[in-house]
Each structure stands twice: as C-alpha cells, then as structure tokens.
Image (spheres, rainbow, N blue to C red):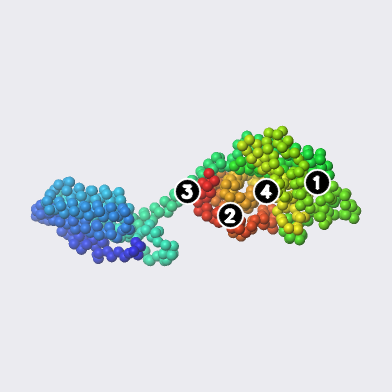
C-alpha cells in the first residue's frame, strides 16, 4: 500500500505514546518524595520500562516509508531491545556503559540512516529514557526538579513527529492527480513543519541554477572546441576558392563572350565568419547585369504559383527594343528570363568545357564538377580537406536579390528564388554590434548541431538565422552569460515553427522558409528537437 494512503492512529491523549508510557504518568511517578527513595528499586523499575519503550519506538518506525534505511534502523532497534533485555536479566545497576550505552548507540545509528522524522522520534524516546534513569539513580540532593512544562514540550514533540510523517516532502511522491486535489484544513503549523516546507524550494532553486550553469559551461566549451574554425584553415580555404573562382571567370569571359557576367565573387558563411566546424563550403556568385529599361521583376504573389518567395523576370518594351537588344534575350522563354536555361548553360560549361585536371594541378588540388543535371557544384580536395563550391547565377534590382536555383520540378522553369542572405547577415551583425551579443555564437552552435545530426541536416543557416532574428525582437538580453537561456529559447521557438510547418521570413512574413521542405522532414526534425528539449546538452553530447 502506498505510504500516503496509510492511516496513522495515534494513541489517545498521549501524543503517540502507549498508555503505560504516558509522560504525564512518568512525571507523576517521578515527583520528588519527602522520604529517602529506594534507589536500587527505582533503577530496576527503570530497567523494566526501557524494553517496553524500545518496543514502542520500533512500532512507530513501521509508520515511516519503507526503504533500506528504515529496515536497517528497525534491525538496530531490535538488537537494542535484545541488549536491554539481556542487561535487565543480568541486573546491571548504575553503570554508564549499560542502558546509557544502548541509548547512545541507538541514537547515533539513527542519525546515519534516518531523516528528520525518524531522528526526532528516536531523540525524544532516548531523552525520556535518560531522564528516567537519571532520576532513578541520582541521590535526592542532586536531582533536578522536572516541571510539567518540560514534559508537556516532550509530549508536543511526539505530536510534531506525527505531523512530520505527512509532510509536503513525502507528498511529492504522489501523482499529479493527487497533488491537484484540495488539501484538508491544516492544523497549527509547528516550527519543524515550517523548516521542512521551506527547505524544499531552496534545494530546487539551487538544483536549477546548477543545471543552468552546467549547460552554460557545456555550450561555451562546445563552441570553443567543436564550433570555432582555426583562422589558418579559413584563410587557406578562402584563398583556394578565390583562385578557382578566378580561373572559372577567365574561362567564361574568354570562351563565352556572349554571356557577359559581371565579376564573380565569393559568398556565403565562409566569407562572413558564420561557418561552423570546418571551412568546407563556399558559394560563387555569378552576377547577371540586367538593363532596367528592358527587364522588370514580377513579385511572387503575381505569378502563376502565387508564392511570394519565387519571382519572375519579364522582358519588357519589346515593341521598342526588339529581341536581341539585350545579351540575355537568348535565355527568354515565353517572354520571361529562364533560370533553368542559365543553369543548363553553365552546367554544360562546367562539365564539358573546362579542363579541371589542369587547373587542379596548377593549384595543387583536385577539382571535379558534379555531373547531376542542373547542379552547379564543384567538389575540391586539397590535402586532407574537402570543400564544396555551389555556383549561383544572381540577378539584382534595387534591394531585391534573385537566384537561379534548382528548387522546383515540372514545367515551371522561369522562376527565380528571392534571397535574403545579405540582409539577414547584415541584420545579425548589426544587432550583435549594438549590444555585444552572442547571436552569431548561438547560430554557429546550432549550425554545428544540425551538421552533426543527419535528421537535422535540412535546417539551413538561413532557417536558424531567421529564428534568432524573430527572438531578438522579444528578447533583449543576448549577453554571454545568457547563452544557455537563449539557446534553450531558440530550440523552443524552432520547435514551435516546425509544429506549424511555417517559418515566416523576418523581412517578409508572407514568405514561408519551410516551403521547400517535405512534411516528413519537418516531422522528423521536430521530433528530434522536442526529444532533446528537456536536456539540450544531449545534442552536444551526440555532436562531440
């Protein structure tokens, strides 16, 4: 039977003591007499009372929660009872190592194995025994008169033990349903009950502070040892990428003058110091310079897909500027600039025209193009390091940046994906510069976590950046000391977005950044993060 369902029936009018051990009776029996008492006779009577008192202590222990400590104390009490009976038969008198030794032995062991309730119980019992023996063995002139108030305080202490046996500490073991039930009217709260009730919240607060501090230390340690990339590695990767980019641009300008791209440049997290774990990927931006008098951007809401993230580029003023007036007219399909045609043309150049083995030998590396259709990627190996290079044709008008990316399948081939990378990166940098925040540090940790977990690989740096930007609107404390709290909050916010299947863009809330993810991928990522929400350090342990 559960402990909280047991009913304790204290002895009537004794605060839990048997009738024959009632402290009021002991008090009356031990009042000072006018005649010289027979000390030996009273000592023998005290010996007879001790076994009975020890039996009562053992009975009281049965009301406490059953565990190994209580079983051990019950064994000690039983042994002490046997020792008391043995000494009674031998008739030892006035020997400090006799009954007093048993009492001291029992109380010392109770301190080792019992909590508050049991220690108080045995303490009161031993106090009564010692006082009984002292009064029986002391000469009349050395006895101290015991007042009724002293015995009353001892009797009230037994009542406190009964209160302690049903303290809130033990009620914590009940179910949530039991805890939600209204409590019965409380009796007068004793000092002992107040101490027990006040100690528990303090211990809980200390535990939470220790856990938060531990997570903070683990995050900082993980950031230093697993996330940050050595400057030498970053410099070497950027230098190699710039050399390959220069070779590609020279080849296109020389062999394909009909494609007058502007100067190519490096882009992505490697350039902006937002890459984590390893300097293993970078982007080549291939700018397409469009004449503003011949081309216009059509917002996604006005296209056939009605998707605010995917725009179209329309050729205009054909009645005044005939086809061929722009060098990009050869990429027109149905009056719109085709992103698919750009991808196919550049893919043919990368795979079939450029002599990558020769370029690789000059740069002391191995460069291989990815042959998958519409995939503009290069795989580079330099020594023991690998690097992936993604190539993006880019069109820009005003603040709108459009990229040709192979995101969609089917007959729709004139769509361009709006990119927010530049503005989101600048916004993140500005926020950290204004308050010396750790947003970029938090972003790098999240990137490394997602990179190490196959189930989270679909979460890109852009997804994580927008979550942090949204959180920055409501949370102002991004100091280093708050890293653990902000990391936990970002996980909670991310789980909420995954649950809805919608991550609104920070700069255009009509854009859903999760639109390119499958429902199964969203569910799997949400499950992994939700499972680790209670203990975020688990994500770091798996990564390490």
Of callouts 1 and 2, the N-terminal one: 1
Query: Marks 1 and 3: which is nearer the front?
Result: 1
**Label 4: how many residues lie within 10 Å, few (<14), some (14-19) or many (20+)?**
some
Q: Work out how far the residue at label 1 is from the one at label 4, CA to CA, in angstroms.
A: 23 Å
Viewer-proximal residue, 205 or 407? 407
Element at label 3? helix
**For mark 1, what is the residue?**
289
Q: Which mark sits nearer the N-terminus, 2 or 3?
A: 3
Earlier in the chain: of badge 4 and badge 2, it is 4
Q: Name the residue that disc number 4 marks.
A: 424
Residue 25: give x, y in percent of width and height: 18, 61
Along the horizontal axis of the image, is 118 left or right of 203? left
Marks 1 and 3, Cα distance to the nearest angstrom?
55 Å
Q: Secondary structure at mark 4?
A: helix
Mark 1 in CB contact with mark 2 (< 8 angstroms): no
Instruction: Name the residue beneath numbered marker 3.
Output: 211
Q: Is residue 272 visible?
A: no
At 83% across and 49% down in the image, what residue appears? 328
Q: Give the numbered dot on residue 525.
A: 2
Residue 366 in view, yes or no? yes
Q: Is residue 19 above or below residue 108?
A: below
Image quarter of the N terminus: bottom left
Separation (CA) of disc 1 from disc 2: 39 Å
Is there a contact, CB below 8 Å, between mark 1 and mark 4?
no
> Of callouts 3 and 4, which one flags the residue occurring earlier in the amino acid sequence?
3
Q: Quote the CA–CA distance across marks 4 and 2.
A: 23 Å
**Given this view, does label 2 or label 3 mark the residue nearer the observer?**
2
- For image coordinates 39% across by 59% down, the residue present is 173
Q: Which of labels 4 and 2 is toward the front?
A: 2
Spot occupied by residue 71 in the image (x, y as percentages of width and height): 29, 55
Locate residue 115, reporting x and y percent: 32, 53
Ranked by sequence position, the earlier of labels 1 and 3 is: 3
């Amino acid at each position: 039977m559960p402990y909280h369902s047991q009913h304790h029936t204290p002895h009537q009018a004794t605060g839990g003591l048997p009738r024959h051990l009632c402290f009021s009776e002991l008090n009356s029996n031990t009042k000072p007499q006018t005649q010289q008492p027979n000390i030996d006779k009273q000592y023998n009577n005290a010996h007879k009372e001790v076994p009975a008192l020890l039996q009562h202590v053992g009975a009281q222990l049965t009301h406490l929660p059953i565990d190994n400590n209580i079983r051990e104390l019950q064994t000690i009490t039983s042994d002490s009872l046997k020792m008391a009976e043995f000494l009674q038969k031998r008739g030892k008198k006035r020997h400090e190592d006799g009954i007093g030794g048993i009492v001291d032995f029992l109380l010392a062991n109770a301190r080792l194995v019992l909590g508050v309730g049991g220690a108080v119980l045995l303490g009161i019992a031993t106090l009564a025994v010692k006082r009984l023996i002292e009064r029986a063995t002391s000469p009349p002139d050395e006895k101290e008169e015991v007042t009724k108030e002293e015995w009353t305080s001892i009797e009230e202490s037994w009542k406190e033990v009964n209160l302690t046996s049903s303290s809130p500490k033990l009620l914590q073991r009940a179910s949530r349903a039991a805890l939600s039930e209204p409590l019965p009217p409380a009796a007068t709260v004793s000092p002992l009950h107040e101490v027990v009730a006040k100690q528990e919240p303090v211990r809980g607060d200390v535990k939470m502070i220790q856990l938060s501090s531990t997570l903070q230390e683990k995050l900082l340690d993980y950031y230093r040892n697993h996330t940050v990339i050595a400057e030498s590695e970053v410099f070497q990767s950027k230098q190699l990428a710039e050399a390959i980019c220069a070779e590609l641009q020279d080849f296109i300008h020389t062999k394909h003058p009909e494609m007058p791209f502007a100067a190519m440049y490096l882009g992505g997290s490697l350039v902006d110091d937002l890459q984590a774990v390893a300097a293993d990927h970078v982007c080549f931006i291939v700018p397409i310079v469009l004449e503003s008098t011949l081309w216009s951007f059509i917002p996604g809401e006005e296209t056939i897909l009605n998707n605010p993230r995917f725009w179209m580029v329309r050729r205009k003023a054909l009645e005044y500027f005939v086809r061929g007036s722009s060098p990009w007219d050869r990429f027109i399909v149905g009056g719109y600039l085709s992103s698919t045609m750009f991808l196919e043309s550049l893919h043919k150049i990368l795979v079939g025209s450029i002599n990558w083995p020769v370029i690789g030998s000059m740069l002391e590396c191995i460069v291989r193009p990815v042959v998958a259709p519409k995939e503009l990627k290069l795989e580079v190996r330099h020594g023991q390091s690998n690097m992936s290079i993604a190539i993006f044709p880019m069109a820009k008008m005003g603040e709108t940046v459009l990229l040709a990316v192979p995101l969609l399948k089917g007959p729709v081939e004139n769509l361009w994906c709006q990119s927010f990378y530049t503005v989101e990166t600048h916004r993140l940098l500005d926020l950290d510069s204004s308050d010396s925040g750790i947003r970029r540090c938090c972003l790098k940790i999240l990137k490394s976590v997602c990179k190490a977990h196959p189930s989270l690989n679909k979460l890109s740096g852009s997804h994580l950046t927008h979550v942090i930007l949204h959180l920055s609107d409501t949370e102002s404390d991004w100091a280093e000391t708050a890293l653990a709290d902000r990391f936990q909050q970002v996980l909670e916010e991310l789980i909420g977005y995954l649950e809805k299947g919608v991550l609104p863009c920070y700069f255009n809330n009509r854009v859903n950044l999760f639109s390119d993810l499958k429902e199964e991928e969203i569910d799997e990522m949400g499950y992994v993060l939700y499972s680790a929400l209670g203990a975020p350090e688990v994500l770091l342990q798996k990564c390490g």
